[in-house]
């Protein structure tokens, strides 16, 4: 159960970061780095989901 909560929190965090980069942070100088952080979070969430569904976690 706790892994699903962590998975949900990671997805929520990445989605909010990505939404901010297309909204208020669009003009920031390092917007590419901020978007990369969101993409890494999505990748971590997918790894966690894969491990959970295959029974490895």
Image (cartoon, rainbow, N blue to C red):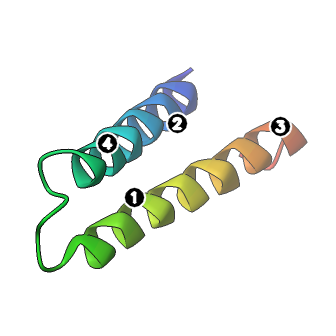
- Contact, CB < 8 Å: mark 4 with mark 1? no
Query: Toward the viewer: 18 or 50?
Result: 18
Q: Give the alpha-carbon distance from disc 4 to disc 1, as whole Å.
A: 10 Å
- Separation of disc 4 and disc 2 at Cα? 18 Å
The tag earlier along the polypeptide, 3 or 4, is 4
Task: Count neighbours of disc 3 (C-alpha within 10 A) and say few if under 14, some if 14 to 19, many if 20 or more.
Answer: few
- Under circle 4, the secondary element is helix
Report the front residue among 47 and 26. Answer: 26
Secondary-structure class at tag 3:
helix
What residue would you read off at disc 2? 7
Badge 1 density bin: few <14, some 14–19, many ≥20, Cα 10 Å = many
Outermost residue on the front side: it is 27
The residue that disc 1 covers is 38
Q: Eyeballing the image, is 47 above or below 36?
A: above
Return the residue nearer the eye: 4 or 37.
Answer: 37
User: Is there a contact, CB below 8 Å, between mark 2 and mark 3?
Assistant: no
Closest to the camera, between mark 4 and mark 2, is: 4
Give the percent coordinates (x, y) of residue 13. Answer: 33, 41
Foreground of the two, 1 or 15: 15
Q: From mark 3 to mark 4, how far is it between C-alphas? A: 28 Å
Circle nearer the N terminus (1, 2) = 2
What residue did someone put label 4 on? 19
Question: In the picture, residue 38 is in which quadrant?
Answer: bottom left
- Residue 53, disc: 3
Real-space Cα distance between discs 2 and 3? 12 Å
Position of the C terminus, as image quadrant, is top right
């Amino acid at each position: 159960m706790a892994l699903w909560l962590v998975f949900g929190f990671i997805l929520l965090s990445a989605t909010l970061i990505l939404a901010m980069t297309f909204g208020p942070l669009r003009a920031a100088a390092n917007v590419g780095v901020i978007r990369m952080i969101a993409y890494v979070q999505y990748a971590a969430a997918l790894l966690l989901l894969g491990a959970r569904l295959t029974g490895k976690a």
